[in-house]
Amino acid sequence: MMFGLMMIGNDEDDEWLSPREFMNFGWPAHYFLKGREGLLLYGWAHMLRGALAAINLSLIFLALFYLVDSLYKERSDRSTLFYRSLPVSDNILLLSKLTVGTAGFLMLSYLLGVVWVLFSQLVFPAEFSRLLEGNGFSLSQLALWDLVGDWFTFHLLQLLWMLPFALYLLFISAIVRSRPLLIALGAPFLLALLLRFSIGTVEPIAALLSNFESLGDVLLTEWRGGPPQAIHPGETVELFGGFGSYIFQVRTLISILAASGLAIGTRLAYRRNFSTS
């Protein structure tokens, strides 16, 4: 009887896998992705795109704080006396702050995004790589060189379309005596309320802020994310489409003209406030 129980126990033990054997057998990729390897590449591409957008949005958010404080802090801590003593013109001083708050943050966003994508490709799990390669798929299907160019073009488009807002923040920073961020964000909100209760619409404010919505629409339009079954072995997978055509639109010209007007106002406010700082 004891011998029989031992034989049954041995047979049952032989049917079980140790944790190490279970992992080596291909958990979890083997069980969850078998026959759906294109889904893995699809999800990875979406993760890369999402991370690029998150990095970009984070740097844009930081640029807001930099721009709205740049000239206000200069006056409040009297460092404007030092800057004005340098052998450079006011135009150069203002241009340097604008360049850092726009092109500087956008270039950092671009570089961090590219580094993130390259690093992610290097640390892609080996188990998933073997699963992809065993079924004709590969990370090399992702058009990374196209991504480098497309993502740079998108940042250039951002620079042109968001330039009026950057100069608006500089203008607010140059004229206010306190709480520049609150005033910069609160003024459009109060104006929207005034328009809503006076003429019954906030369309004028929406039109002024339409560049933000347009940038989001452009990004979604060029977001290459079809169904997973559309990805085939060996086929090139683009993360984004081309953004170059959007640069040559009337919106770009209007943005540059609006930014020019705000630049003139910012320079006048900067010179006027120097004597009372």
Image (cartoon, rainbow, N blue to C red):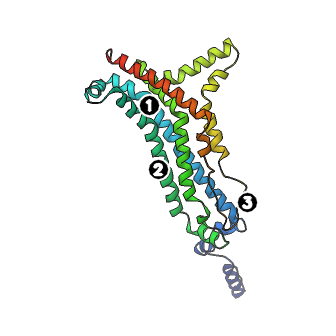
Q: Quadrant of the N terminus?
A: bottom right
Q: Which mark is residue 111?
A: 2
The residue identified by callout 3 is 230
Tag 2 or tag 3, which sits nearer the N-term? 2
Q: Residue at x 73, y 55 (%)?
A: 227
Q: Quadrant of residue 7?
A: bottom right
Q: Could you say where residue 20 lies in the image, as x and y percent from the top left?
A: 58, 73
Q: What residue type is labelled 3?
A: Ala
Q: In which quarter of the image is the C terminus?
A: top left
On screen, residue 72 above or below 44 = above
Residue at the extreme bottom of the image, as rendered:
3
Q: Is mark 2 on a helix, strand or loop?
A: helix
Q: In which quarter of the image is residue 221?
A: top right
Q: What residue type is labelled 1?
A: Leu
Q: What element carries label 3?
A: helix
The residue identified by callout 1 is 67
Kindly tell me whether residue 172 is visible in this rendering: no
Tag 3 or tag 1, which sits nearer the N-term? 1
Describe residue 133's horizontal placement relative to residue 56 as left or right: right
On screen, residue 117 above or below 198 = below
Q: How far apart are marks 3 and 2 (CA)?
A: 30 Å
Q: Which amino acid does label 2 sit on?
A: Leu
Assess disc 3: are there few (<14), some (14-19) or many (≥20) residues with their C-alpha within 10 Å of its C-alpha: few
On screen, residue 144 above or below 4 = above
Q: Which mark is residue 100?
A: none
